[in-house]
Image (tube, rainbow, N blue to C red):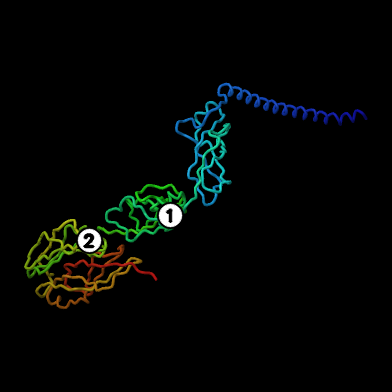
Amino acid sequence: MRRRWFARRAPAQAGRALAGGALHGVTGHWALGLFSLLAAFAIWVVVEDVENPRAEGLVPSQPGQAVSVEPRNVPDGFIVADIQQIQVNVEARRDDLPELRAGDFRATVDLADVSEEGTFRLGVKVEARRSGVRVLNVVPSTVEVRVERGASREVAIVVNRLGQLPEGYRESSDPVVDPAFATIYGRQDLIASVEKLQVDVNLSGVRDEHYSIDGEIAARTAAGNTVNVTITPARARVAFAIEQTFSQRTLALVPTIVGNPAPGYIITNIVVEPATVVVSGPKLIVDRLSPLTVEKLDITGAKGPLTRSQQIERPANVSIERQTVTVRVEIKAIECSAQATAPCGTAVLYVGVEPLGVPPGLAVEPGVYTTEVRLSGPLDQLALIKPTSLRAVASLSGATAGTALYTVNVSLLAASQVKIESVALITIRLIPVTTP
């Protein structure tokens, strides 16, 4: 019986012994670690006290510097006109003392018991903002505080422009300032010296049609000197409306040909070199311009190509990059087909043009659009050709809003020996579609 009981108890006792040994080992390691940490800290403290001991010093130590004192609980209707600055006697690590600055401390004086104007001597409370620094005392221990009744008034906010808008731009209306007024508060003499409240805005390089900026409000004297007063609100938004007054556009040049070639000859092509010119001037004028015309070139009786330097007809109040262009008119003899049974001749018809492929959002400005078509062929067949015998279309695919020259494609609606020799370009103006 005793042997069975011992057989049952022996494993349990062995397990408890093993667990107890393990727990003792863990507890021993933890205690050893804690002891090591405390010992290291103690050694560091000893070394620090030896190599960098604590010492006393006056802060700030730099010549001409002092800690500003902040007034608290200033009574309504009063302002602090003047308050004495201080130095602080502190205890800190010797190596830290030279690095301490006025901003490492917060000094305050309580004005809760002040109820009238005058100069008062009050105690100062100082707090260190850096750890390891202890404030011992304040020098001086009390400061003089001069209290005056404050003044306030409302002043309009205006814009002080710095820099100029780029050439060709101007303000189309007065800027809008929001809010339009601000309240200034401070010493009576300072409030009286304020002539204006301004928001400084630099307009250099600004080309945006609608330009706005959120700026700080400054109180200034008539001479432009800044006055130290409280401004409520402290900022304002200024919105400008800016328009372009000077513009440049590249416009097409349209030749003006008068007269007719010699009998039996026809114009096959007209070339203007260069085909465009840059026009500069007031935006309102330049935006309304259509392609420019070139002075008339008379080809009466010509039997071959003509090349002339022609003047560009310049609109009033604008400038153009060049005064003349080269106009070349190609003229050749009429060639009749072998099947022709009558003498050959030429004809000029003005045919209505059908615009095709108008881009979405645009429309052709209402008006009559025709082009000049020069034909050649047997006289008996030319006599039968009418404007309705031809179909003229102008492709506007990919076009943009505005006035431009477009190529016209002309075809005969019935078989004939008549040839289409040349088709004049057409001027079409596209306008944006107004959506209700």
Query: Element under label 2?
Result: strand
Q: Which numbered mark, 1 or 2, is in the foreground of this view?
A: 1
Q: Which residue is drawn at 18% across and 69% down?
A: 420
Quarter holding the C terminus is bottom left
Q: Is 17 situated left or right of 396 in this image?
A: right
Where is residue 223? Give x, y as percent. 34, 49
Where is residue 357? Give x, y as percent. 31, 67
Looking at the rendered structure, which numbered label has been put on residue 98?
none
N-terminal label among 1 and 2:
1
Where is residue 100? Give x, y as percent. 51, 32
Give the image quarter of residue 297. bottom left
In this figure, which residue is indicated by the disc labeled 1? 236
Q: Is 159 situated left or right of 92 in this image?
A: left
Quarter holding the N terminus is top right
The amino acid marked with disc number 1 is Ala
Query: Element under label 1?
Result: strand
Badge 1: how crowded within 10 Å, few (<14), some, or many (20+)? some
In this figure, which residue is indicated by the disc labeled 2? 251
The amino acid marked with disc number 2 is Leu
Viewer-proximal residue among 46 and 323: 46
Q: Is 222 situated left or right of 43 in this image?
A: left
Viewer-proximal residue among 221 and 100: 221
Where is residue 242? Give x, y as percent. 33, 58
Q: Residue at x 35, y 49 (%)?
A: 224
